Amino acid sequence: MKKIIMTALTVLLAAATAHGSGYRIPEQSGNSIALAGAYVAHTMGPDTAYFNPAAMSWQEDAWQMEASMTYIGLKSIKYQDNLTSLKNGGSETENFFLPLLHVVSKDINNFRVGFSLAYPAGLSKEWDAPFPRCSTEEFTLKVIEANPTIAYKLCDHMSIAGGLRLIYASGTVKSSATYPFAATLPPGAALSRDMDGDTTELGYNLAMSLRPMDNWSIGATYRSKVNLNITTADAKLNLMMGTTPLYPGYSGHAEVSVPVPAVVTLGTSYTIDDTTVEISWDRTFWSKYDHLDFEYDQDFDIAGHPFQAFDHSVEKDWSNTDCYRIGITHKCTDKFTAMLGFAVDSNPVPEKNLGFELPDSDARIYAIGGRYQYRKNMSVAVSYFYYDKESRDITNANGIDGEFSEAGAHVANIGINYTF
């Protein structure tokens, strides 16, 4: 039991995802949400700056800007234990609003410049039930990316691009363990952790766009891995009996590194009359996330130390994942364009390491949206998708022997495109 509780307590920066495998968030615009992320070969507006900056070369020769708001609603995940109802629980439902911005310049001697403000990753999960709270009472990780890009048109059929990933991340973590769910503690005692930290990191992205024919496009992108070296000067570890310390607490420096993984995406689209179909595949390189290890100014990884659980390297051993997507765009009239999408997404978390902090599972995405040309230089768009995760039965050394079910997310976006 001691090993189970210690393992559960040390799992930290891997809370439940807003959507996407692991904690990646692929969809960063109205078009990408409406097409379930099948959006790398046939990009249609300012968000090209993010999804395939090389395709900026094929955009209208004008300045373009898209401003939008994405809503993410996380459903409550239910856990039902096979052995005792005392461990049952449900996570909190959560709601988030993410403002997005994409800009593409006019042509400048076959060069185009772009900029995107996006959220490539994010975590959030809260559990109130005593057993899940041992690892995840509260966790929030916000990752914001400023992505300047530049494209160059090599010829009428090929363009290349590259850019920088300027990432700021901040996180808040709280966890607590009490008797009987931490059997090594005396009745009434509470072991707790409370941390806030942040970091600023740098990465890059590369892209290529091919137009073998006017109605056939091929796109490829690569986003580099970015390690989030999250640091705080005010981590707090305590073992208390009510308001009385049972052991001297810790207040000071702590740091941990987790990756925003590298991603490669390939896609092709074909247009017949007013209908474009795109299929795409992306691979997320989660295998670089092999362990989780906190560093403090003191060494707590000593047998019998009350805070050993917080200073113990935890095996993650995640796997690379694949996502297969299809999107259909149909120009219904001169003013209105409809979009549909579907995707099948795999999850990176092995059964042996899965816990309440990320009860991930394979998923399907169902998407729909539309864009209306309100004026010659202005359009409005609305899109929605539902991220439906499968139920998952888990039995492992983290003390979990039960089923996670009803996980999923509602994602909607409303935005305005403006050309000038």
Image (tube, rainbow, N blue to C red):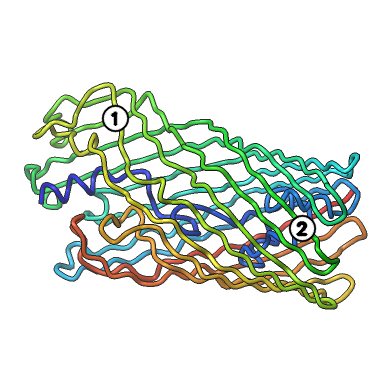
Residue 329 placement: quadrant: bottom right
Q: Is residue 397 left or right of residue 328?
A: left
Find numbered disc 1 in the image and state the secondary structure of the residue it sits on. strand
Query: In front here: 127 or 388?
Result: 388
Q: How many marks?
A: 2
Q: Is residue 374 left or right of residue 33?
A: right
Find numbered disc 2 in the image and state the secondary structure of the residue it sits on. strand
Residue 238, compared with residue 33, is above or below; it is: above
The residue at 86%/50% (across/down) is 155
Q: Which residue is mark 2?
A: 210
Residue 406 placement: quadrant: bottom left
* Residue 415, percent from left and from top: 73, 57
- For residue 120, the mark is none
User: What's the residue type where badge 2 is placed?
Assistant: Leu
* Residue 185, percent from left and from top: 9, 42
Classify mark 2: residues with Cα within 10 Å, few (<14), some (14-19) or many (20+): many
Query: In front here: 100 or 129?
Result: 100
User: What's the residue type where badge 1 is placed?
Assistant: Lys
Mark in front: 1 vs 2 = 2
* Residue 202, percent from left and from top: 57, 33
* Residue 409, percent from left and from top: 50, 64
Q: Is residue 401 left or right of residue 377?
A: left
Could you give the CA–CA distance between mark 1 and mark 2, rounded to whole angstroms?
Answer: 53 Å
- For residue 236, the mark is 1
The residue at 56%/48% (across/down) is 120
Do the residues bearing badges 1 and 2 touch, measured as CB atoms within 8 Å? no
Classify mark 1: residues with Cα within 10 Å, few (<14), some (14-19) or many (20+): some
Along the polypeptide, which appears first: circle 1 or circle 2?
A: 2
Query: In front here: 280 or 386?
Result: 280
The residue at 84%/66% (across/down) is 213
